[in-house]
Image (cartoon, rainbow, N blue to C red):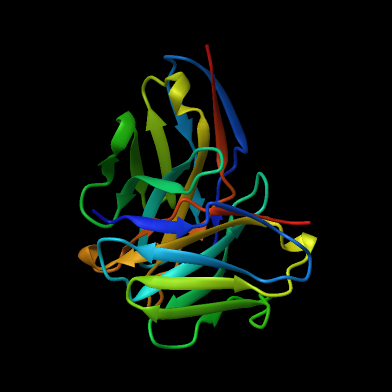
């Protein structure tokens, strides 16, 4: 149990276009999901906390108009990178809090490699 | 400020040798501690966690870690490593409070050599 799936696993897009990344909790309901960004050979940086049915909470320095987060249901959160530019190229990872552990533990998706050309 | 420190960016070790990956966190009244492993171009897999109780925690793949409150450390150990253990290892902390977000260390690359 406790599987989180991200789609797509990789995507290449042209500069100026938008890309949507999905994060799904397959076998549990997650009221809270998190979006991270990871640069090569670096750690995960939290971008935002996504709560079902409410606006996401963005970390300092993250452009909320550029990285749109929607948590429309208890099993799905989406991250849309709007008007993507090459500097947005990165590895994006989502995670979902697992209620079976009192939300103390989060399970991670497999990540999405975004390349903007 | 809340922070997690992994002092070693890379740890080379020979196969079947023991290894310790260090993790220190900024002091707090209550913390939950985690170790994750990441293989290239993949997400994170939980190795083990400390929530409460025994300070020695055993995880998957033969890894274990010990929570040391006085030293604010949560070092990861394995008595005998395999080539397949080569990966990036991240220590993460969830600090007590309303939020359940994780703060990650910078990661340690465990490079197992034959």
**In-image side of B63 versus A40 (left or right):** left
Which of the two residues, A4 or A104, is positioned nearer the viewer here?
A4
Give residue A74's position: percent from left, percent from top.
32, 76
Q: Residue furthest bottom?
A: A54
**In-image side of A88 versus B90 (left or right):** right
- Residue B27 seen in the figure: no
Image quarter in which the C terminus of chain A is found: bottom right
Figure quadrant of residue A65: bottom right
> Vertically, is A52 above or below B11?
below
> Vertically, is A16 above or below A111?
below
**In-image side of A67 versus A7 (left or right):** right
Which of the two residues, A101 or A117, is positioned nearer the viewer here?
A117
> Vertically, is B43 above or below A99?
above
Residue shown at 55% from the left, 62% from the top: A36
Give residue A112's position: percent from left, percent from top.
56, 55
Which of the two residues, B70 or A50, is positioned nearer the viewer here?
A50
Give residue B78's position: percent from left, percent from top.
38, 28
Residue shown at 59% from the left, 73% from the top: A80
Give residue B59's position: percent from left, percent from top.
29, 39
Residue shown at 68% from the left, 75% from the top: A82
Residue shown at 49% from the left, 80% from the top: A70
Figure quadrant of residue A63: bottom right
Count of numbered tags: 0
Which of the two residues, A107 or A80, is positioned nearer the viewer here?
A80
- Residue B63 seen in the figure: yes
């Amino acid at each position: 149990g406790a599987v989180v799936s991200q789609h797509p696993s990789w995507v290449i897009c042209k500069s100026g276009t938008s890309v949507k990344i999905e994060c799904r909790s397959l076998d549990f309901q997650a009221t809270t999901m998190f979006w991270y960004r990871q640069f090569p050979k670096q750690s995960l940086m939290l971008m935002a906390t996504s709560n079902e049915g409410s606006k996401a909470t963005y970390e300092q320095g993250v452009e909320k108009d550029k990285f749109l987060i929607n948590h429309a249901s208890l099993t799905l959160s989406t991250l849309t990178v709007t008007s993507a530019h090459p500097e947005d190229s990165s590895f994006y990872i989502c995670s979902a809090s697992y209620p079976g552990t009192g939300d103390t533990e989060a399970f991670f998706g497999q990540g999405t490699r975004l390349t903007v050309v | 400020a809340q922070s997690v420190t992994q002092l070693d960016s890379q740890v080379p070790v020979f196969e079947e040798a023991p290894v310790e990956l260090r993790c220190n966190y900024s002091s707090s009244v209550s913390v939950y501690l985690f170790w994750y492993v990441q293989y290239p171009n993949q997400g994170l897999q939980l190795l083990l966690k400390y929530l409460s109780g025994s300070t020695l925690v055993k995880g998957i793949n033969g890894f274990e870690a010990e929570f040391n409150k006085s030293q604010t450390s949560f070092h990861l150990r394995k008595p005998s490593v395999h080539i397949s253990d080569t990966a990036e290892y991240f220590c993460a902390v969830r600090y007590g409070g309303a939020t359940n977000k994780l703060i990650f260390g910078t990661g340690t690359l465990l490079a197992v050599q034959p």
